[in-house]
Amino acid sequence: TTNNKNAALEALFAKRARPTDEKEVPLKDDPEYQKYFKMLKVGLPIGSVKQALMRDGKDPSIADMDPEKSYSSQTESSEEVNNSQATKIDVPLKESEEYGKFF
């Protein structure tokens, strides 16, 4: 068990020692998005910030993201969810076993 602990600690330290990519910068510190999170911080309504994002050709859903996390960490999980939903077979509701009884 001592070897497992040492291996776990070495893995943890190796992970911390890796240089961070530009992609791993928190959104609030990312030069591309930092002005929008500053707008939120000073109290502008989220709708105004989303409008500014659209005006600048960026995705307005960025305003809903966690400013402490990187853009890549938040979009990867949403892409995985979209992919898992895409693999489901869509059946019309009236042919569905669960909802067909309502038609």
Image: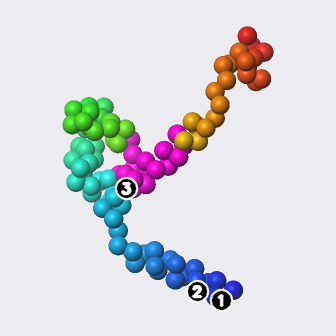
Q: Position of residue 15 (x, y in %)?
A: 45, 74
| As drawn, 24 above or below 99 | below
Residue drawn 35% across and 73% down?
19
Residue drawn 38% across and 41% down?
64
Q: Position of residue 14 (x, y in %)?
A: 46, 79
Residue beneath label 3, please? Answer: 70
Quadrant hosting residue 29: bottom left
Tell me the amino acid under the disc marked 2: Asn
79 drawn magenta: yes
Tell me the amino acid under the disc marked 1: Thr
Task: Please state, as top left, top right, bottom left or bottom right, where the C terminus lies in the image.
Answer: top right
Residue 50 as seen in the image, left or right of residue 11: left
Asked which secondary structure carries label 1, the reply is helix
Tell me the amino acid under the disc marked 3: Ser
Measured in 3D between alpha carbons, the distance from the residue under mark 3 to the one under mark 2, in whole angstroms, is: 30 Å
Front residue of this view, candidates 24 and 40: 24
| N-terminal-most mark, 3 or 2 | 2
Asked which secondary structure carries label 2, the reply is helix
Is residue 71 at all visible to an observer of this figure? yes
Residue beneath label 1, please? Answer: 2
Front residue of this view, candidates 50 and 14: 14
Measured in 3D between alpha carbons, the distance from the residue under mark 1 to the one under mark 3, in whole angstroms, is: 35 Å
Residue beneath label 2, please? Answer: 6
Measured in 3D between alpha carbons, the distance from the residue under mark 2 to the one under mark 1, in whole angstroms, is: 6 Å
| As drawn, 3 above or below 28 | below
Q: Which residues are magenta?
A: 64-82
